[in-house]
Amino acid sequence: MAAPERAPHFAALQSVGAFVPDGPELWDFAGLIIDYDPASALSALRVPLLAVLGAADNVVPVEASAEGFRRAVRPELLTLRVLDGGDHRLQDPETEVLVPDYLPTLVGFVGTIPRR
């Protein structure tokens, strides 16, 4: 973490918007999640799932993410949306503002869930 020879690599990652932990607590958290595979949890779902991906995600390839959801989640439970212009955080990379379709997508999905 603090090794000086790693500084240029961390700087390069940060320059393209990658998350680089900046303290011991965040490094511990990153260590816990870095190789987590959600497939088993996703395949166990019995409720509708909205998966929202950003078309401009430069962290995780969009088609690989979409395919992972399609493989793991029962088709009748999965609603998959790819939002134009959205990065990994579903923000416009230039302005860091949520893409315009984000909230309407959430609201529209929630509106499809039957009330009990």
Image (cartoon, rainbow, N blue to C red):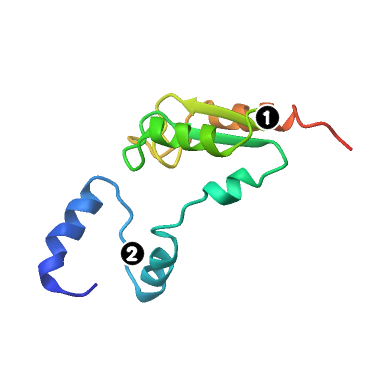
Q: Amino acid at mark 2?
A: Pro
Q: Residue furthest left?
A: 5
Q: Which residue is mark 1?
A: 109
Q: Amino acid at mark 1?
A: Phe
The quadrant of the picture occupied by the C terminus is top right
The quadrant of the picture occupied by the N terminus is bottom left
Which picture quadrant has residue 26?
Answer: bottom left
Q: Residue furthest right?
A: 116
Which picture quadrant has residue 106?
Answer: top right
Tell me which residue sits at (52%, 35%) in the image.
Answer: 71
Q: State the residue in front, 59 or 44.
A: 44
Q: Are marks 2 and 1 in contact (CB under 8 Å)?
A: no
Q: Is residue 75 above or below residue 97?
A: above
> In the rendering, which numbered label is found on residue 92?
none
Could you say whether the residue bearing mark 2 is in a helix, strand or loop? loop
- What whole-number distance in Å separates the C-alpha atoms at marks 2 and 1? 33 Å
Tell me which residue sits at (15%, 65%) in the image.
Answer: 7
Q: Which residue is mark 2?
A: 21
Residue 97 place in picture, x, y as percent = 44, 37
